[in-house]
Amino acid sequence: MSKTLVIHGCGGHGRSVAALAERTGYAHITFIDEGAAAAERIMGYPVLKAVTAELADEECLAAFGNNERRLRQTRDLVAAAATSSVSWQQAP
């Protein structure tokens, strides 16, 4: 079974997390960024404006370079996981 990771944020920190994820066995990566352009791709992976139903049950993490924003997003992900089946992981 291949592992999937949803990364919130596609800047430098998000790309570093994606590179690490590739090296640790994640075969499928999707970036989430509200400012994503249609059909945008980074490092060959899709960039979406929001999490789709197909990705709702996948591992996800906040990977913004700004620590305060990353903390806020992580708290939002934890809250979403508490009310749904969304899983989460803190950025390394």
Image (cartoon, grey):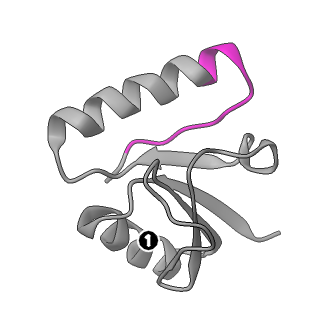
4 relative to 69 in the view: left or right: right
Q: Quadrant of residue 75?
A: top left
Secondary structure under tag 1 reads helix
Q: Quadrant of residue 14?
A: bottom left
Instruction: Name the foreground residue: 32 vs 62.
Output: 32
Instruction: Name the foreground residue: 53 vs 1.
Output: 53
Position of residue 52 relative to residue 4, above or below, is: above
Q: Main secondary structure of the magenta part?
A: loop
In the image, what residue occupies the spot 26% across and 63% down?
Answer: 13
In the image, what residue occupies the spot 80% across and 42% down?
Answer: 53
Position of residue 51 relative to residue 37, above or below, is: above
Number of residues whose C-alpha sits closer than 10 Å to that of mark 1, classed few (under 14), some (14–19) or many (20 or more): many
Coordinates of residue 34 in the picture (x, y in percent): 46, 47
In the image, what residue occupies the spot 48% across and 42% down?
Answer: 89
What segment is highlighted magenta in the picture? 81-90
Amino acid beneath label 1? Ala
